[in-house]
Image: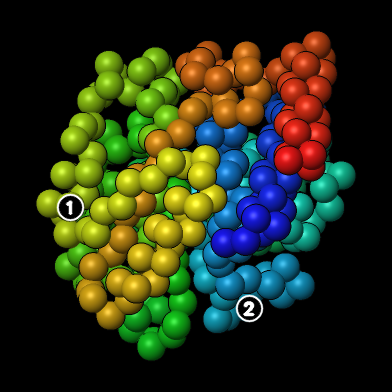
């Protein structure tokens, strides 16, 4: 990746984070913490990795994305808006009664959403079905799904992973956002899922560990995913992240799992992101 490409992604990630704050502030509700931890991955997927077309969101040969941790819809919506699927100006309508941008992704109302999600554990099963369907039809389609580390406590995650390995879905990329926190506190205290890498490997996946805020790491991981095509093994990317990344008072705080910023907090967060933008531009 060239330095110019990386800089462009970094600047785009700032916009995605701004969209998270703008939408949750406008809703006076929502889930900023996990949206911000995954913001860099949303950026990489939608602005570099996936073969998609905002002009034709339902194009049959497009890659698919399933947000299994559906409560982090603000992050997905922001990425979709900045990618051109719908107006960025609509983000503040999040969760409003008359808005198409509700608290969890809805494939029937939001352009670019490939699967309605919300019940934890179920999104990955849908992604497995999409990947199996593409294989059955002989289509060159990749399927990506982001799962939360707290979501790993759901048994359906492991059933889906076992199925993906059984059906040799090497066109499936499972991305686990390991920010260490969930609504009730530290994931290791609520339901310890470690060793996560050994579990996914035991279920038949090729497992990669990355820094979830490093675009270089993402590039190398997805290169390995593509190199695995034809090997008959799904890929799992375990990305280490910081919940609330980019907004100082939200970082690594479980309380920001499902709470919106008030006016003062919104102003502070946006100011910090603007400072981050200037730092990137001047680098």
253 left or right of 236 in image:
right
261 left or right of 181 in image:
right
Residues 164 and 207: in front is 207
The total number of labels drawn is 2
Dot 2: few (<14), some (14–19), or many (≥20) neighbours within 10 Å?
A: few
Q: Is residue 84 visible?
A: yes
Location of the C terminus (image quadrant): top right
Q: Residue 97: name its quadrant.
A: top right
Disc 2 marks which residue? 59
Mark 2 vs mark 1: in front: 1
Q: Is residue 25 visible?
A: no
Picture coordinates of residue 122, whole percent (x, y)? 38, 48
Label for residue 201? 1
Picture coordinates of residue 49, whole percent (x, y)? 55, 64
The residue lying at 48 percent from left, 59 percent from top is: 219
Q: Residues at badges 2 and 1 in contact (C-beta under 8 Å)?
A: no
> Does 278 sit above or below residue 165?
above
> Does 264 sit above or below residue 29?
above
Location of the N terminus (image quadrant): bottom right
Label for residue 5? none
Callout 2 secondary element: loop
Instruction: Mark 2 or mark 1: name the one nearer the start of the chain.
Output: 2
Q: Residue 232: name its quadrant.
A: bottom left
> What's the distance in space between the residues labelled 2 and 1, CA to CA?
33 Å
Q: Residue 282: name its quadrant.
A: top right
The residue lying at 62 percent from left, 14 percent from top is: 249
């Amino acid at each position: 990746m060239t330095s110019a490409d990386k800089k462009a992604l970094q600047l785009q990630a700032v916009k995605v984070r701004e969209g998270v704050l703008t939408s949750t502030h406008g809703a006076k509700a929502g889930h900023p913490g996990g949206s911000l931890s995954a913001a860099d991955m949303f950026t990489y997927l939608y602005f570099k990795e996936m073969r998609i077309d905002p002009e034709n969101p339902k194009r049959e040969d497009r890659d698919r994305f399933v947000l299994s941790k559906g409560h982090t819809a603000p992050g997905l919506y922001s990425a979709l808006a900045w990618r051109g699927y719908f107006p960025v100006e609509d983000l503040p309508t999040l969760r409003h009664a008359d808005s198409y941008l509700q608290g969890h992704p809805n494939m029937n109302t939001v352009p670019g959403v490939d699967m309605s999600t919300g019940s934890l554990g179920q999104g990955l099963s849908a992604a497995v079905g999409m990947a199996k369907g593409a294989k059955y039809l002989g289509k060159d389609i990749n399927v990506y799904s982001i799962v939360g580390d707290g979501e790993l406590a759901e048994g359906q995650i492991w059933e889906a992973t076992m199925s993906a390995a059984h059906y040799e879905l090497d066109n499936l990329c499972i991305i686990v956002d390991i920010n260490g926190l969930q609504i009730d506190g530290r994931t290791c205290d609520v339901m310890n899922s470690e060793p996560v890498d050994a579990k996914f490997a035991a279920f038949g996946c090729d497992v990669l560990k990355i820094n979830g805020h490093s675009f270089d790491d993402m590039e190398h991981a997805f290169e390995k995913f593509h190199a695995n095509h034809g090997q008959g093994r799904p890929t799992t990317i375990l990305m280490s992240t910081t919940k609330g990344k980019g907004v100082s008072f939200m970082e690594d705080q479980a309380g920001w799992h499902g709470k919106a910023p008030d006016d003062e907090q919104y102003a502070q967060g946006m100011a910090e992101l603007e400072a981050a933008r200037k730092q990137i531009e001047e680098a």
